[in-house]
Image (tube, helix red, strand yellow):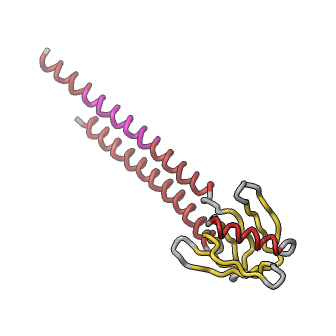
Amino acid sequence: MTQSVFRSVLRAGTLRIVIAVILALSVSIIGVGARTSFAQDNSVLSGIIVGVETDENGNLTRFALSDSTGNVTTYELSAETQFGLENQAGDRWVSSQGEEPSEAARHLRDHRERFAPVTVSFANGIASSVVEREEGKLETNLGYLFAVFAITWVLFFVYVLYLGSKQRVLQHEIAKLKGTIG
């Protein structure tokens, strides 16, 4: 009788330790992902181009972007503003505002006409880069995927250990019943 009580206490303690480890891993992985995405959200915005302004020479001076909630944000440009945009055929154009401001205006107008989403990196209302829309950070998604994968396997092994302990208890009960009958 004391052995079965000892075993159940041992199993309960092991189960608590396993649950604590699972929770600690999931909180640490999710916490890292949340901090990473928060730091990036402060200076990156994705949306569609809704306005393009040029000077009398046709050089791009500023543009407006509408995000998924309908908020329109206007961005100024500097000579260092980088562009990495694709046309409808998929050809990529890479340049800067200082090199080809009129070409930048043409590409942004093309994106506006096609409702093609872009991602803008900015600081203080000045765009530092304008690129094709980035779907999300792969590293963050892989962190969540690993967390779910690890938790699933840990839960599977805990379940296997639980079934093994139940099987041992049943075998012990069967042996006791055979002893009392025979």
Q: How many marks?
A: 0
What x and y, as percent, mark residue 153?
47, 41
Question: Does the magenta run of residues contain 120?
Answer: no
Query: Which quadrant would the C terminus be assigned to in this image?
Result: top left
Q: Nearer the viewer, residue 36 or 134?
A: 134
Q: Nearer the viewer, residue 110 or 42?
A: 110
Would residue 40 appear left or right of 55 to someone viewing this image? left
Q: Nearer the viewer, residue 153 or 24?
A: 153
Instruction: Give the main secondary structure, helix, strand or loop, of the magenta stretch.
Output: helix
Above or below, 87 against 173 in this view is: below
Query: Which quadrant would the N terminus be assigned to in this image?
Result: top left
What x and y, as percent, mark residue 91?
76, 55
Which residue does the image show at 12% across and 17% down from the upper left? 181
* Residue 118 sits in quarter: bottom right
Question: Does the magenta run of residues contain 164?
Answer: yes
What x and y, as percent, mark residue 60?
78, 78
What x and y, as percent, mark residue 10?
35, 42
Which residue does the image show at 73% across and 60% down from the upper left? 86
Q: What stretch is highlighted in magenta?
A: 153-170
Above or below, 107 against 75 in this view is: above
* Residue 3 sits in quarter: top left
Which residue does the image show at 34% across and 41% down from the upper left? 11
Which residue does the image show at 63% across and 75% down from the upper left? 50
Would residue 34 appear left or right of 58 to someone viewing this image? left
In the orientation shown, which residue stands out farthest toward the top? 182
* Residue 95 sits in quarter: bottom right
In the orientation shown, which residue stands out farthest toward the bottom? 56
Above or below, 173 against 149 in this view is: above
In the orientation shown, which residue stands out farthest toward the right? 99
